[in-house]
Amino acid sequence: MTAHLIFDEPDGRNRLDSMAQDVIGRPIDRSEGALKVSGRAVYAAEQATSLWSEQRTDCLFGILVRATVARGRVTSLDTADALAVSGVREVLQDPRLVRHPAQGMARKSPPQEVADVGCFGQPIALVVADSFEAAREAARLVRVDYETAAAELDPASAPSDLPEKKQSSQGDLDAAMRDASESLDVTYRTPSMAAAAMEPHAALAWWEGDRVTLCGAYQMVSQNAEELADALGIAPEKVRVLSPYIGGGFGSKLGIAPEAVAAAVAAERLGRPVMVPLTRQQEFEIAHRRSETEQRVRLALDADGLLTGIGHEARVSNQPGETFSEPVQQATHYTYRGEHRSIRHEVARVNLTCAGSVRAPGEAVGVTVLELAMDELAEKAGIDPVELRLKNIPECDPESGKPFSSHMLAEALREGADRFGWTSRRQRGRQRAGEWLIGCGMAAAVRVNFLHKARVRVTLSGEGVTIESSMTDIGTGTYTILTQIAAEMLGIPPERVTTRLGDTDLPEGSGSGGSIGAASNGSATYLACEEIRRQLASRLGCAEEDLTLKDGRATCGNRSHDLAELIHEPLVAEGFFEPGKAMGRVRSSTWGAHFAEVAVNEVTGEVRVRSMLGVFAAGRILNEKTARSQCIGGMTFGLGMALMEEMVHDGRHGHVVSRDLANYHIPTNADVPRIEVHFLHERDAYGGTLQAKGIGELGICGAGAAVLNAIHDACGVRVRELPATPDKILAGLCGMQG
Ligand code: MOS
């Protein structure tokens, strides 16, 4: 029985509020947490070992060979030395390999000519051997001849295009800037960034007849199965993808990737399972990067402190022919008022690592820069930064005129200012402790909210509940929140709910990406449970709304039954949630406010973040602990963006210089202060049947701006080229002294 809901009308019934179990929202521990911390959760690269334990000792290992030119064509591969390494089976350059990961939700990934080199580090062949070590050694011994071509390595000077759909304007921004009583015209730069997930990509493939099974680290397995089928030229039904545990994705595992296709091709050819892991260095070269950005922001303010104009121009980059471009201005369209608006979006075509979705694509860097500019404008206009934002919250989407599904920015700003003690701290002014200058800053957090179609199957038996979907849990807490939804709806303790995810043989979930997972698959889980409740209610002869399920008992009026007695055979229902017309009628977004206190060393230029506070609203919070962890992670990314993250390409050859975690700096525990997260109570009727919105990507949006604005408050330096490393702070301090 499928309960299919096309979400055409908002759902303001808030039914989860009136269920009796009271487990929804609770900060319960991750249901798979014990497996993970004890090492029993088997990750992609560990699948080979688990095959061994099943007596399948025939697994081979593959290592991708990387291009060492930025652009050109492979003219020959000399594999003699590689093949001479003991245990090496084959060097493959199959026409079905892919050189770029598919983009998120692509559902296709046609083979890409790997002999055509579009960037340094691109995979061009695969070495397969009996051991990982032999494959890795041999991959270094493959000698490659290229016919090289001139490469575009500088995003600032490379030829560019203007994707039509990403340009927009209304009114006359130039006139608004001329007539403004205060205005700002400033350009910021953010560097390329890597997803840098803790778990590197890995894929293990084997064939049974004409059917291939792939165990790998992927965020959207149902779509990834279609992509793998496309690359291999086989029917999607012939592909099964398993991805039960994933050590972070952050966008880098959205699409099927070169290692997966290579593993499948090699396994077919050699008739044995083949595992292809990426080394940490390859992770930086092959997984998508976030594009660097150059962003010009223009703001026009009238004498009352109201914005009359907003301009946001961005130049980003990607390889020629790639359709993705970092959607920098995604939230600029609706964050602040102003009738004169202009958005220009330019994509430079470069021979650098392919760009794609990384950790809140768009807002992570776009909101950050907009919020840096707002701080500069507040200073120029002599208005408190919180006040400037509060004054400029629009009534409705300022471009489309659509109402907001819910709007919580003002509440977040006020609650945050209150909790942080903003007004008194700002009045107290800059503090000094020896060489350390202490200041504070803030920024708004904004992130678009999406829903996606999702299917989830729920089975209720005397034993408990089973939830099944191809949805993934990339470390965000999906296992746990789906468990909580079913426990709440069916009156079963969470310990008796089993959730199975990450298998394409199960009903098609949305996958994890764009913060769609919780609300979309949660709504599908809700629908399945509601259907089971209807079936139970009809057995009891009452309406579903009148049925109370609690602690394994069904109560209806004055009759009460043990659930196990009512169910002679398992009740099964599939929930199918499809976003319909509802979302198109509104602007749906999540909201928040960041506050930070930093200390800047006036001798060394070093920055220490002393505290961060985030206040967030994302509809119903399904689990306060997993939601908080998402926000803490996002804010930590923001800290890294402000102070350290930078993927550096060598300007001469385009190779990634900072391609390991020693050179690509991300915050460590010692860099991260106590981070406080507070959620605002909210129900969004447009957030599916749960009144929930995505929270995974909200925490990063604007967090870096709060840190950088605090640096300015502490020492007067505005760093407009991220990250704010000590050399840049010192240069600013010296400039001021001179
Ligand atoms: Mo996200 S960057 O859509 O995984």
Image (spheres, helix red, strand yellow):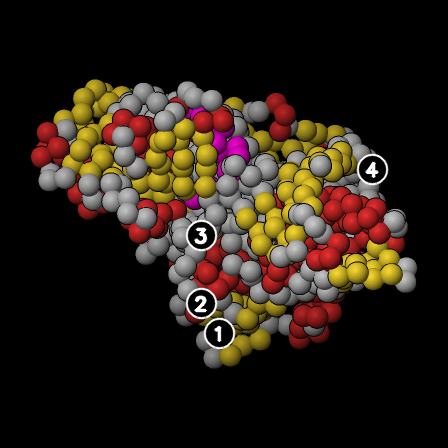
Q: What element carries label 4?
A: loop
Q: Is residue 219 magenta?
A: yes
Q: Please tell me whether residue 668 is drawn above or below residue 198 in the rendered image.
A: below
Q: Tell which circle, 2 or 4, labels the residue nearer the N-terminal end.
A: 4
Q: Are marks 2 and 3 in contact (CB under 8 Å)?
A: no
Kindly report the distance in space between the C-alpha atoms of the residues bearing marks 1 and 4: 55 Å
Q: Please tell me whether residue 674 is drawn above or below residue 631 in the rendered image.
A: below
Kindly report the distance in space between the C-alpha atoms of the residues bearing marks 2 and 1: 21 Å
Kindly report the distance in space between the C-alpha atoms of the residues bearing marks 3 and 4: 36 Å
Q: Tell which circle, 1 or 4, labels the residue nearer the N-terminal end.
A: 4
Q: Mark 4 points at which residue?
A: 9
- CA neighbours of label 2 inside 10 A, class few (<14), some (14 to 19), many (20+): few
Q: Tell which circle, 3 or 1, labels the residue nearer the N-terminal end.
A: 3
Q: Name the residue under label 1.
A: 436
- CA neighbours of label 1 inside 10 A, class few (<14), some (14 to 19), many (20+): many
Q: Do the residues labelled 2 and 1 touch (CB within 8 Å)?
A: no
Q: Can residue 215 be seen in this view?
A: yes
